[in-house]
Image (tube, grey):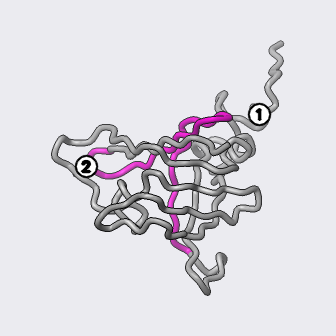
Amino acid sequence: MILLSCSSQQGAVDGSPSATAWRSGVKGQWVLHSIDKENFPPAYSVKSIFEEAPAECFVGSVWNLPNNGKGSITFDAEGTLCAPGAVRNIVWSIYNPGKGNGEPQFQFKKIYPGDKPSNVTAGYRLSLSYADAEQLTLRMPLDLEGKTGYLVFNFERLQ
């Protein structure tokens, strides 16, 4: 008989954390300190992410992910297409695909002034790679001419 002593494993599939455990690990305030490229062809570039701005505009942004799911992204980077001080309201959650249907994912949708979150149907899902008390790593898959590359979002928790 095997006993698990880690409560965050309850509801886990194949030893990976459950959607509930991921939600507990993700909530809080995070600074996006870097975005890495994984499996990218050398000359390939990404012009915009989340239909918002170039990836470099997100570096330094603060992601506020409170328990109620009504969060925000506050931009800090200076640059040609960046808007330091701009705030994008979001609604976030952990997508649970159900037992045997894949791993939980971080998901969010942008909420513009006057929008009701229930009326916004477009959003984004990122793979949950790692979360602890200080760090969070999310991976965004991208189709790169028939191959899959990833943008890897590396966050540090704000204290």
The relative height of residue 74 versus residue 37 in the rendered view (above or below) is: below
Quarter containing the C terminus? top right
From this viewpoint, which residue is outermost toward the left?
Answer: 43
Q: Please give the name of the residue rendered at 50% of the width and 61% of the height, measured from the top-left corner.
A: 124
Q: Please give the name of the residue rendered at 28% of the width and 56% of the height, measured from the top-left corner.
A: 46
* Quarter residue 116 falls in: bottom right
**Of the image marks 2 and 1, the number of the one nearer the N terminus:** 1
Q: Residues within 10 Å of mark 1 (few under 14, many from 20)?
A: some
The relative height of residue 45 versus residue 25 in the rendered view (above or below) is: below
Count of numbered badges drawn on the protein = 2
The amino acid at mark 1 is Ser
Dominant secondary structure of the magenta stretch?
strand
Q: Please give the name of the residue rendered at 64% of the width and 66% of the height, measured from the top-left corner.
A: 91
Quarter containing the N terminus? top right
Q: Secondary structure at mark 1?
A: helix
Location of mark 2 (residue):
146
Residue 138's mark?
none
Q: Is residue 126 magenta?
A: yes
Residue 40 is situated, as x and y percent measured from the top left of the image, at 26, 42
Q: Which residues are magenta?
A: 121-148
Between residue 47 and residue 119, name the one nearer to us: 47
Q: Secondary structure at mark 2?
A: loop
Q: Please give the name of the residue rendered at 64% of the width and 32% of the height, measured from the top-left corner.
A: 16
Location of mark 1 (residue):
8
Residue 74 is situated, as x and y percent measured from the top left of the image, at 54, 62
Q: Is residue 68 magenta?
A: no
Residue 73 is situated, as x and y percent measured from the top left of the image, at 55, 62
Tell whether 57 sits left or right of 62: left
The relative height of residue 25 versus residue 15 in the rendered view (above or below) is: below
Between residue 145 and residue 115, name the one nearer to us: 115
The amino acid at mark 2 is Gly
